[in-house]
Amino acid sequence: MSELRAIPGNNVDPGSYSKQMVDDRQLLTNRDYVLMTAAHNEEAFIEKTIKSVLAQTLLPKRWVIVSDGSTDRTDEIIESYAREQQLICFLKLTRPAGRQFASKGIALQKGVKLLEGVSFGFIGNIDADIAVEPAYFATLLEHFERDPQLGLAAGFIYEESDGVFRSRAANRTDSIPHAAQMVRRECYEMIGGYSIFKYGGEDWYAQQCAKMNGWHAEAIPELQILHGRHTGTAGNLLKHQFRLGRLDYSFGSDPVFEFLKCAVRISERPRLLGALTRFLGFAWSSACRESRPVSNEFVQFLRKEQRSKVLNMFRGKSRDNVLRLENR
């Protein structure tokens, strides 16, 4: 069951999204963009996110916010802004209680249908627990304008420690966080939008598919994404690491690369146990011969990239830059 909350005067006629995606190209301006957000029980953060977007120097043409089975005040907060802000469309979904990593992809796929009738050149995702500076999306668009082959771009994740926001250790210029990501429309169409996976990872998959199709991807260090909660703190940290190991296996990560990557991350929370648990998750899925939801072509492309990184490490390049393939 789902319930749509759309603002008066901005009615949406659900239909074929793929048809809309190829219509009215002549009406686009270079800086037209839309946003999507999937939110689940984010009453502590969602208002800061909404205020952050509404403060942008260049506003989106439409912002679809999907409440993914929220049971706290998330819906109430979103609805209060949707009534006042014409650019916001609100979609309320219901689902069984509990944290389900595939649910974010489902929410985004349902939300994208509310972009019917809107002409845009770029589509972005912004998580419901982050804030960005007022010129964030305008600056991203400047990078897209300078590089016609740039398919995906975002800033760097910053997390609070002792009252100060600091750059996350996993940040890298070639790993594009989904938290406040923008995708060129042509690239988005080519990769088929955001997919649904049991263990999550729709952002990693989108990035790899974009590169497979010849697009560039860039994370920009000077653009700060202020994350309201530390990655993995929405649930048990060890469960989070075990899931990441299973995710790595499901996408076809090379076993040697996985071992070295986990070794590099021994110092990350929880120290030693986190890295060990992640590798155990990978090994468990391997022992169970779990089927992979991605193509052989995807696995081959990913492993070729990972093996290249390992070779670069042994040639003396920074182990952190070599082994932190996905930003999670």
Image: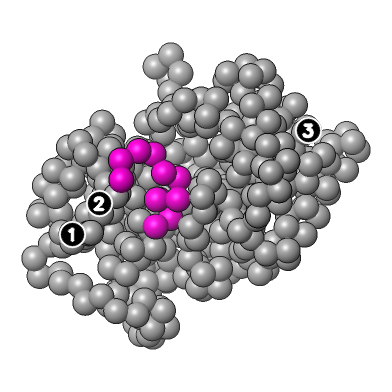
Q: Is residue 41 left or right of residue 99?
A: left
Residue 228: x and y, percent? 37, 31
Name the residue carrying label 2.
94
Q: In the rendered view, tell whether residue 117 sits above or below residue 296.
A: below
Could you tell me the amino acid type at mark 2?
A: Thr
Total number of numbered labels? 3
Q: Please tell me the numbered disc located at residue 41.
A: none
Question: Which sits in the foreground, 327 or 151?
Answer: 327
Q: Is residue 269 left or right of residue 320?
A: left
Residue 116: x and y, percent? 29, 75
Kindly identify the residue that appears in the image at 55 percent across and 73 percent down.
190
Q: Please tell me the numbered disc located at residue 260.
A: 3
Q: Is residue 130 left or right of residue 295?
A: left
Figure coloring: one colour
- Name the secondary structure under disc 3: helix
Question: Which sits in the foreground, 162 or 55?
Answer: 162
Q: Quadrant of the N terminus?
A: bottom left
Of marks 3 and 1, the one in the foreground: 1
Residue 105 included in the magenta stretch of the image: yes
Q: CA distance from mark 2 to mark 1?
A: 8 Å
Of marks 2 and 1, the one in the foreground: 2
Name the residue carrying label 1.
3
> Do the numbered discs 3 and 1 sit on residues whose CB atoms are within 8 Å?
no
- Name the secondary structure under disc 1: strand
Q: Earlier in the sequence, mark 3 or mark 1?
A: 1
Residue 145 included in the magenta stretch of the image: no
Q: Which residues are magenta?
A: 96-106
Kindly identify the residue that appears in the image at 39 percent across and 63 percent down.
109
Of marks 3 and 2, the one in the foreground: 2
Q: CA distance from mark 3 to mark 2?
A: 41 Å
Q: Earlier in the sequence, mark 2 or mark 1?
A: 1
